[in-house]
Amino acid sequence: MKIKTKLNLSVGLLFVMIVILSLVGSYYIFQIKKDTQNILTANYNTLEYSRNMLLALDAINTDKDKAVAAFETNLQKQVDNITEPGEDKVTQSLQRSFLLLRADGSNESIKSQIRQDIFEIMKLNMVAIKNKSDLAKMTAETANIWIAVIGTLCFLIAFNLMINLPNNIANPIRELTESIRQIANKNYSERVHFMNHNEYGDLAKSFNTMAEKLQEYHNSNLYKLSFEKKRLETLINNMHDPIIGLDTDNVILFVNDEALKIMGLKRAEVLGKSATALALSNDLLQSLIRQSNTNDKHPLKIFADGKESYFEKEVVGITITPTGEDRTIAIGNVIILRNITIFKELDFAKTNFIATVSHELKTPISSIKLSLKLLEKPNTGTLNNEQRQLIDSIAEDSERLLKITGELLELSQVETGNIQLNIDKSDPNEIVNYAVEAVKVQAEQKQIEIAVEGDEKIPQIKADHEKTSWVLINFLTNAIRYSSEGSKILVQLKTEGDTVIFKVIDKGKGIDSRYKTKVFDKYFQIPGSPKSGTGLGLAISKEFIEAQHGTIGVESELGMGSTFYFRLTMV
């Protein structure tokens, strides 16, 4: 018989017995409940009415009208609650006696008759309560017998399943697991033998077939492995990017011709050797393996192909999942050097062009501003309103052009590595005060309050005072631009560990999460924002702060404002 059939029959029988047990229990519980409710409704209420009528009868001499009304009310309830044999005749006799009592309230013989009738009604209901209680007791005893019988059957079936079923299932699985372990250890002669004509028998047959095929494959795949190894080596050697493969102990597993060329080494000197040992006499290899598990953002400058070339390092971690296991393990790293020389040359040409154009633009822009100053003097002539508006517009555009050319010159200095930093001890409070004072006029034009909040006794930092102030001014200028009139901008100055953090917090419209990682990119402007700049301010700020070994970032949610910050190290 199939295991599935056995399980279905055993569990199905147990399920049916449990259902029967539930139905029997529910039925007898309902019967007991019904008997109990019957006693309460039919008999207990009658006893309560009878007691109330006796109390009203005793009080008839003191307050006849009230007692008669109470008696009549409970009598009517009793008439509506007649449930026992003979109770209707006694109740009718009680009604007749009550009518006589209402006419003559002082007649003691009538009262005596009424009491006898009430006692008779109470006696009938007391007897009924006892009979119904006995009936409920019998129902409960019958329920106990049936539940005990069915429960015992369920226990026997479950106990039999608990004893036999685990062994029937676990023992073949244990034997199969051991056989699989032998196969994993390359013992392909292992076989399993299940004689039962069930699923395990089919599994054993399939397993033995697989083991035979693995044994056959194991005896014939060495040539294929050698062929695939040579094909992989040829593929790696034909790649134009230098590639070096390392294991977890930094032993060089493979290296292509391009990598050997830039390192100036031969293949026999490299393969199977420790990269750490070779790095002692090879500066390039030393820089490559210094952080072989991380990607370096800065390009490497290497003399190759008769000129200085630039390479971008990428480290790819190699992991595998062993057969039969769930977790992955690291087996090494592959270092790939991508040749970006052509892109660097184009970038240098672009930077030099921008620097030249920006420098050449500053002279005519300065001349335009000087001419505007001369036009504004009274001795050059009186200006009408339209001429005054034109001059103001030209002055505003000239100032914007001058700012753009200044940012482009700053960017060209950063990109060419000609940025001049004067790092010295600087007071963070002086930097904040200088930046707030520089944007004071802009803030007043929009009626924006700039508040400064900071820890007491902020220590000095290692920073370029001018460049750091420039970054903070850029943050404040952006905050003023994107804040509504009458709002508030908060400048926070705090210490965190061995660093001082500068924060500019505004209540503007915030930045969508899609653009937070791009705001420090060159020429990037958030879609939908006013095109009032070049998109270089934050990019230059990032370069200035990172050149001082600091960090810069932004925290923002759409509609909740933005917080721009940077950290610099204490002295």
Image (cartoon, rainbow, N blue to C red):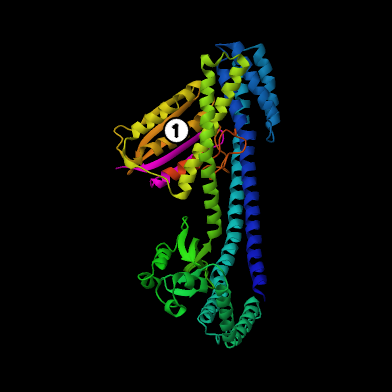
On the image, the x and y values in percent for residue 258 come to 51, 71
Residue 563 highlighted magenta (yes or no): yes
What residue do we see at 65% from left, 57% from top?
19
The quadrant where residue 273 appears:
bottom left
What residue do we see at 57% from left, 76% from top?
232
What residue do we see at 29% from left, 33% from top?
457
Q: Is residue 205 above or below residue 372?
A: below
The quadrant where residue 179 appears:
bottom right
Image position of 470 (left or right of 321): left
Residue 485 is at least partly visible in this image: no
What residue do we see at 45% from left, 27% from top?
439
Image position of 518 (left or right of 283): right
Task: Farthest residue to the front: give it.
Answer: 380
Residue 345 is at least partly visible in this image: yes
Residue on which the image places disc 1: 473
On the image, the x and y values in percent for residue 270 come to 43, 76
On the image, the x and y values in percent for residue 87 come to 68, 31
Please report the bounds of the magenta region as a residue range. 545-571
Q: Is residue 112 or residue 479 the one in the foreground? A: 479
Residue 366 highlighted magenta (yes or no): no
Quadrant where the C terminus lies?
Answer: top left
Q: Is residue 438 or residue 303 the one in the foreground? A: 303
On the image, the x and y values in percent for residue 379 come to 52, 14
Image position of 505 (left or right of 533): left
Residue type, mark 1 in image: Ile
